[in-house]
Image: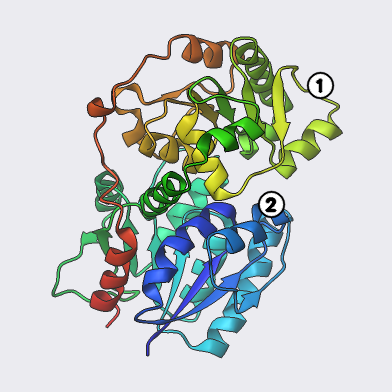
Amino acid sequence: MKKILTVVGARPQFVKCAAVSSVLRKQYKEVLIHTGQHYDYAMSDVFFEELSIPKPEYHLGVGSASHGVQTSEMSAKIEEIILQEKPNAVMVYGDTNSTLAAALAASKVYVPLIHVEAGLRSFNRRMPEEINRVLTDHTSSLLLCPTETAMENLEREGFLRANVHATCSPEHPVILNVGDVMYDMVRITIRQIEKKGNTKEVLKQFGVVAKQYCLATIHRAENTNDVSALREILSAMAHIASKIPVVLPLHPRTKAIIERENIALPSGVSIIAPLGYADMILLQKNASVVCTDSGGMQKEAFLLQTPCITMREQTEWIETLHDGWNVRSGASASAIIAAYNNAQILEPDTQKQPFGDGFAGEKITQAIGTFIA
């Protein structure tokens, strides 16, 4: 049985891994590495438990550090495991430091790299995530894209679309549109939530009523390392909270910066600990609006047909901007408030669906069998 070594390290990757591993392990031996980039229980262990992700064979325990230190430490440890396990391919997800670390390790020892969620571009090289995704794509052998836009981005960079007669290797990388793995998890999770039938009870625990509250998250470095930007966002949340309840699951790093800078939290905003995946999906589906700087939540809100305000200047998920489902505001309080005030009621039948059919895990497994043979 062929062996795939999968590397994850952050919350969004755990979710994507859950969608793929359950299918992949029917045909391949998967060896799972958790780098420890997200190590807090609420950001890590809870997702493995809730999403029934197999226990990692390796846990590197890297934790937080500067980008360079964190990436180099992970890469060195991953290289040792690759040499020990001798996989047929290494698979990575998204655009975190864990992603780049594994990509560098695989390329140095000449093992084919599979990049799930390839081809995304914000075209902002000041974002660490943009550097990570570009470098990972250009060291990958099989680039699995979530959308046609991602495919076109890679074609402009010289990559070739796969065909059934092709194989992939470090010298001959190929690109393929498999759809978005997060759509798989949204589809599965919504079905589970509907089966339980306890949405009203869960919302009551958070003190909100369906379609009468805002769900917000803040974690991206451009908004948290810049204290003025963080203050602007919190000011906007205070304004929205004067209109409707705001629920804010607070990222541990954001919380630490708020405490360090002695920033007063806005009244009327319900600050809660980070939540598990199912609760976040339930809250997003039933919110009247989502305010976030998360790439994953922009897409989840779109898939759940909930209007979204993205508190960034750019987005990799430009498809979500179609028909006004997602609006970019940046970190300006006035722009966020204007976007909230101008939010329109969007009809579900106006939404285009660019993210596949919700069965990306099956397509990824099939692609591996075809192109890594």
Taking the image as shown, residue 174 lies to the left or right of residue 103, namely left
Picture quadrant of residue 2:
bottom left
Say which element carries label 1: loop
Image position, residue 292 (x, y; %)? 55, 31
> Does residue 310 appear in the picture of this structure?
no
Image position, residue 181 (x, y; %)? 38, 55
Q: Which residue is mark 2?
A: 42
Q: How many marks?
A: 2
The residue that appears at 53% across and 66% down in the rendered structure is 52
From the image, which quarter does the C terminus lie in? bottom left
Q: Is residue 299 above or below residue 181?
A: above
Q: Nearer the viewer, residue 290 or 93?
A: 290
The residue that appears at 40% across and 84% down in the rendered structure is 88
Label 1 environment density (alpha carbons within 10 Å; few <14, some 14–19, many ≥20): few
Q: Nearer the viewer, residue 143 or 359?
A: 359
Q: Is residue 5 above or below residue 183?
A: below
Q: Which residue is mark 1?
A: 264
Observer-side mark, 1 or 2, equals 2
Label 2 environment density (alpha carbons within 10 Å; few <14, some 14–19, many ≥20): some
Taking the image as shown, residue 205 lies to the left or right of residue 287, namely right
